[in-house]
Amino acid sequence: MIKYALFFLFVLETFFAYWLRHINLKHLKQYGTSPPKGFEDAIDAEKLRVSAAYTLDSSRLGLWESLLDDLVLVVFLFGGALALYDGFIASFANGPVLNGICFFLILTWVQTFLGIPFDLYGTFGIEARYGFNTTTVRVWISDFLKSQALGALLLSSLLGGVFWLIHWSPTHWWIWVWAFMAFFSLFMMFISPYVIEPLFNKFEPVTEPGLEDEIRSVMEKAGLSVGRVTQMDASRRSKHSNAYFTGIGKVKRIVLYDTLISQMTHGEIAAVLAHEIGHWKKKHILKRLLWAEALAFGGSWLAYQLLNWPGLPGLLGYSEPLSLSAKMVVLGFVISLAQFPLTPFLSWRSRCHEREADRFAADLTGKPEDLASAMAKLSAENLSNLFPHPWYAAFYYSHPPAVERVEQLKRWANER
């Protein structure tokens, strides 16, 4: 009975997600015919038409991929394939650590393999059709092989540590696993800019005259030190634009996409980075880390309790014993169903942080219109959907819709 109740809940949540996707695209078709206020200089009617077509094509591809993922999930969990796969892994992977690594590593490879056709069509079909793709088949294959090798290494290290701790401390592993995963996450944040990112992109000092000085001026005004200001060869793979900065402590590393530098003025670039600075000065990053770790701590304790509960496999109708790895899959599915209703709250919380960062950037630079112009250009150049359905945005958007952000920034500019 519980199995069918969980299946019904999964179908209900999946249908709701697809319905939100449907009304979002319908809203775009209905209202996305003329440039919104504040975007007249960044996008014309023809580009708006192309933007809508790009959103529709990308969404359709995402829909088909989601349908396949959901179908595979139903067969795997509710069709009995989980028990068969569990037995297959147990036939050659002896020991709890090796079993856990092989179970999730092979599962990840299967999921990756199923996603390859969608990735290829998205890159060389849709992205190429709308003028974004600049990567070659050779670069795609190189990136794929490197990401798979690196992902397997990191995942094996993480899984090996987790399952070893569970085996080493059967009654208190939830504390040690939480601490280990927290340390692993911080370690990855530290080494990623220096070890992992250079494997895929080339980083070099900013060559645009005067840009580095302007960026450093904004950073110093905010009380932050800049270690390096670099540009990344994003144009080697795509014409999409972005910027970010990383680092632990007061020394930050600025990274600009070379595509962004070619699209924006110095003032607009400085405004985008001022927004990112706002996240640090408002302690959004720290708050998110603390929130995530608090949830992870509670989640580890809950996982310990439920994984030791004999009735867990029976939630999906399994009567035969399952390995710890298989029970983790069951638990993860049940938790995902419980977390789905929390999505709009988490999205709202993120949007609040984004608005605070926008306000900080406007006050720091004294030019809200620069950030407004930058947001309009980013949306136009990336062919973003400027007309999301309000319900879809409320449920999923981690940032306020672009039109809403630009309107607010212009109001702040008029107040000065």
Image (cartoon, rainbow, N blue to C red):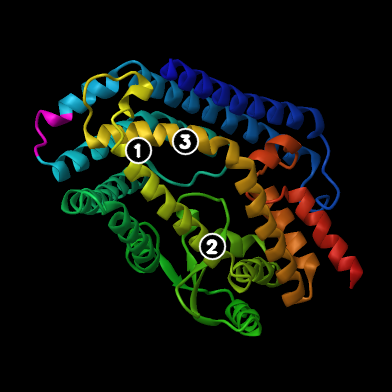
In the rendered structure, the answer to whether residue 200 lies left or right of residue 12 reads: left
In the rendered structure, the answer to whether residue 62 lies left or right of residue 363 reads: left
Task: Inspect the image, locate mark 2, and give the three-letter code of the amino acid beneath it.
Answer: Asp
**Rendered view: 283 above or below 179:** below
Q: Quadrant of the C terminus?
A: bottom right
Expressed as whole percent of the image width and height from the top left, the position of residue 314 reads 33, 22
Q: Quadrant of the N terminus?
A: top left
Give the residue at the far right of this rendering.
415
Q: Which mark is residue 267?
A: none
Expressed as whole percent of the image width and height from the top left, the position of residue 118 reads 44, 30
Name the residue that disc number 1 marks: 306
**Identity of the residue drawn at 37% across and 63% down:** 192
Task: Inspect the image, locate mark 1, and give the three-letter code of the amino acid beneath it.
Answer: Leu
**Rendered view: 165 above or below 270:** above
Q: How many marks?
A: 3
**Rendered view: 27 above or below 290:** above
For the residues marked 3 and 1, what is the alpha-carbon distance in whole angstroms? 15 Å
For the residues marked 2 and 1, what is the alpha-carbon distance in whole angstroms? 49 Å
Q: Secondary structure at mark 3?
A: helix
Name the residue that disc number 2 marks: 258
For the residues marked 3 and 2, what is the alpha-carbon distance in whole angstroms? 38 Å
Q: Is residue 229 visible?
A: no
Expressed as whole percent of the image width and height from the top left, the position of residue 167 reads 17, 49
Task: Inspect the image, locate mark 3, and give the three-letter code of the amino acid beneath it.
Answer: Ser
**Identity of the residue drawn at 22% across and 20% down:** 320
Give neighbour class at mark 3: few <14, some 14-19, many 20+ (Cα, 10 Å): few
Expressed as whole percent of the image width and height from the top left, the position of residue 280 reads 58, 71
Range drawn in magenta: 89-94
Name the residue that disc number 3 marks: 336
In this rendering, the label closer to the viewer, 3 or 2: 3
In this rendering, the label closer to the viewer, 2 or 1: 1
